[in-house]
Amino acid sequence: MSREGSLDVIFNPTSVAIAGVASGGIGQAFLDCLLDSGFKGNIYPLNPKGGEIRGLTVYPSLRDVPRPVDYVISCIPARSAIQLIKDSAAAGAKAIAFFTAGFSEMGSEEGRVLEGEMVHVARALGVRIIGPNCLGVYRPELGLSFASDFPGEGGRVAFICQSGGNAIYLIRSAARRGIRFSKAVSYGNACDIDESELLEYLAEDAETEVVAAYIEGVKDGRRFHSALRKVSAAKPVIILKAGGTDAGARAAASHTGTLAGSDDIWTRALEQAGAIRVHDLEEVVDMLIAFCYLPRFEGRRVGVCGAGGGHNVLTTDQFGAAGFVLPPLPQYVQDEIRQAIRKVLKSEAGFMLDNPVDVTNMPTSEGLYDILKKLATYDGIDLLVGQFSVNNSGWPYQSSGYSSWPEAFTGAAARVRSETNKPLAMVIHAVISSWDLDKALGLERQCSEAGLPMFRSAARAAKAIDRFLRYHKNHPVSASR
């Protein structure tokens, strides 16, 4: 069995043991995650004192577990790591995720030596290591998770992440916007299973259609570049490379014990490999939104429709700066929009009828739908962008079925999305209070359920969609879905 093939065991365990389970400790936190997430296999808590926790027998060691164990989570001190590896091999375990820290990331000779010895013993015994200094694997369809609030449904995005905290943040943030994951790995110091091997595995993974990665440094630059080229040829790969500044590189070295490397070299290498480079976690989520919700399309002619003349102008500028064109609407389309307005109102005063189209004063969901539908069926634009400010929910509003104008506008956009083939993206502005945030999260949920991409600013939408189009232009065959 190849080393890449051996990664199957970390994503498909039928039994998990947790070393270092004690009431109120991190071991119990991992146990709670598995139980609360509905892990479908057997769970074996381990503690030398034995006992019981959450209705499960606590075994003194792996050697006392009565059945084979596939996967081990280590929450014990670093000094006990070698013995745990030996016990794991004796129990039939093929992989250990070491939450345990205190190895090369410490920058000490003792830590580096201990980590090297751990790898030597593990490889001799046929045990794979995730980490150390990591959270391990999230596999929603099995209920294998390191956070109890992660979605239990699987999806088509894979995420590999050197940072445990960033893994939690990214999965939670993306999940709120409807993204679901095939699998995710927090891999820490990468002493054994590293970013290159994970990418090679994901390139062949039929469950994964989009790959995202947070990387601080790599162990083998040549292998990484080869792996990245392989996966990028098959599916979109979004890379957040951290440690680009001198200070960031020092922080990366003390965080996961890796060398960050020159930022300019990274930029060129990622571009040559066909990967999409982003610069913060929010951009990762935006790219996932674009790839998961937008159909593949060509062309950069954008139609903008929304609320607020100022927001419309800014949206026009921001898409224009990203290389898009907002063509003026022909007279017959403007006349159709005018007729839709006059079905509801006596006059189109206060509306902008050209591109961008301002529909602030439209008080009914049916009127909003009519205008959006006319824009979506106009062949002179390739992408329709709807934009609005969430804190304008107090506008005069007459329709039943929705509690506010933004909900009605989003509902109308969802209806148009279901009836046409025109790519449609939504932009929400001006989230400036806790009330706005609650409302925005509800609207994001409404969009994700309708298959609509929603972005939190026009600039972010324009940047993500620009990268989306560039990727597909450079991958004309293999990237098609």
Image (cartoon, rainbow, N blue to C red):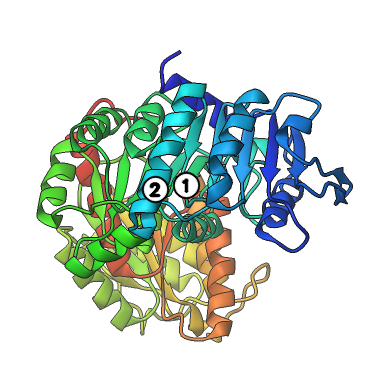
Is disc 1 placed on a helix, strand or loop?
A: loop
Question: Is residue 239 rendered to the left or right of residue 46?
Answer: left
Q: What's the residue type where badge 1 is placed?
A: Pro
Tell me where residue 247 appears, x and y as whole percent: 22, 70
Q: Nearer the viewer, residue 169 or 210?
A: 169
> In this view, which residue lies farthest toward the front?
110
- Asked whether residue 203 is in view, the answer is yes
Residue 99 in sight in this render: no
Report the residue at 53% width, 50% height from top. Answer: 78
Identify the image quadrant of residue 221.
top left
Nearer to me, 198 or 468: 198
Q: Nearer the viewer, residue 2 or 375?
A: 2
Instruction: State yes or no: discs 1 and 2 in contact (Cβ < 8 Å).
Output: yes
Q: Nearer the viewer, residue 183 or 389?
A: 183
Q: Quadrant of residue 89?
A: top right
Which mark sits nearer the N-terminus, 1 or 2? 1
Please tell me whether mark 2 sits on a helix, a strand or a loop.
loop
Query: Which amino acid, by three-letter code, is at mark 2?
Result: Asn
> Dot 1: few (<14), some (14–19), or many (≥20) neighbours within 10 Å?
many
In what quadrant of the picture does the C terminus appear? top left
Question: Looking at the picture, how far across and down is residue 363, in whole percent?
Answer: 53, 77
Label placed on residue 189? 2
Residue 473 position in % (x across, y down): 19, 38
At 17% from the left edge and 65% from the top edge, which residue is drawn? 320
Corner quadrant of residue 56: top right
Q: Which residue is mark 1?
A: 132
Q: Residues within 10 Å of mark 2 (few under 14, many from 20)?
A: many
Q: Is residue 119 above or below residue 308?
A: above
Please provide percent x and percent y for residue 277: 24, 51
The Cα–Cα distance between marks 1 and 2, rounded to whole angstroms, is 6 Å
**Is residue 75 shown left or right of residue 8?**
right
Residue for point 31% across, 46% down = 238
